Image (cartoon, helix red, strand yellow):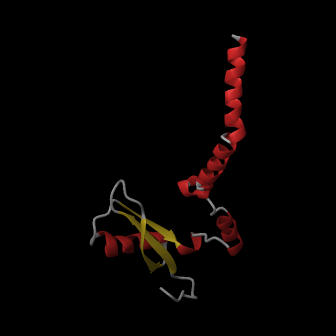
Amino acid sequence: MGKEKDDGFYQIYEVFSKRSHKGDFQHQFSLLAPNKEMAFIMAQENFMRREPVIDIWIVKRDDIRMMQPEERQIVNRLDNKDYRTTKGYGYLRKKWRQYEQQMLDEKEIMSWGDDDKASKKTQ
């Protein structure tokens, strides 16, 4: 329904349906109707008699709120969620390797022998 009527008599309604109790609502089509009761009847006639559905929703298009461009920028900012996936921790392998190499350097290994000699002398 590309063009809206200017006379105000017809309004655009969006039809959503749910095919099973566990399923999600899906947008099916748009229709022009003078009021919500007529839109519901038209949706039933056009859709429910052709396919099995559990429930339908009829929503006036004017009542659907879209995100504004400045609100979309906020959502984009929240899009970096690498910490939720294992790829977000890829740098830890390199850090752990560096930590292990620092921990087991030559001076530390040689100091273990000194501790053994010192403990034997005290016994």
Which is more toward the observer, 30 or 41? Answer: 30
Residue 89 located left or right of residue 119: left
Query: With respect to residue 87, does 14 lie above or below?
Result: below
Q: Residue at x 58, y 56 (%)?
A: 90
Query: With respect to residue 73, does 7 lie above or below?
Result: below
Residue 36 located left or right of residue 108: left
Where is residue 40? Give x, y as percent: 41, 69
Where is residue 26? Give x, y as percent: 42, 67
Q: Residue at x 43, y 73 (%)?
A: 39
Query: With respect to residue 54, does 58 lie above or below?
Result: below
Residue 19 located left or right of residue 93: left
Which is more toward the observer, 71 or 87? Answer: 87
Which is more toward the observer, 8 or 113? Answer: 113
Where is residue 46? Give x, y as percent: 33, 76
Q: Could you tell me which quadrant the C terminus lies in?
A: top right
Total numbered labels: 0
Residue 75 located left or right of residue 43: right
Where is residue 56? Give x, y as percent: 39, 64
Quarter of image, res 27 = bottom left
Looking at this view, name the residue that lies furthest to the top.
123
Quarter of image, res 67 = bottom right
Q: Residue at x 65, y 67 (%)?
A: 76
Which is more toward the observer, 103 or 3? Answer: 103
Q: Residue at x 50, y 78 (%)?
A: 12
Quarter of image, res 52 = bottom left
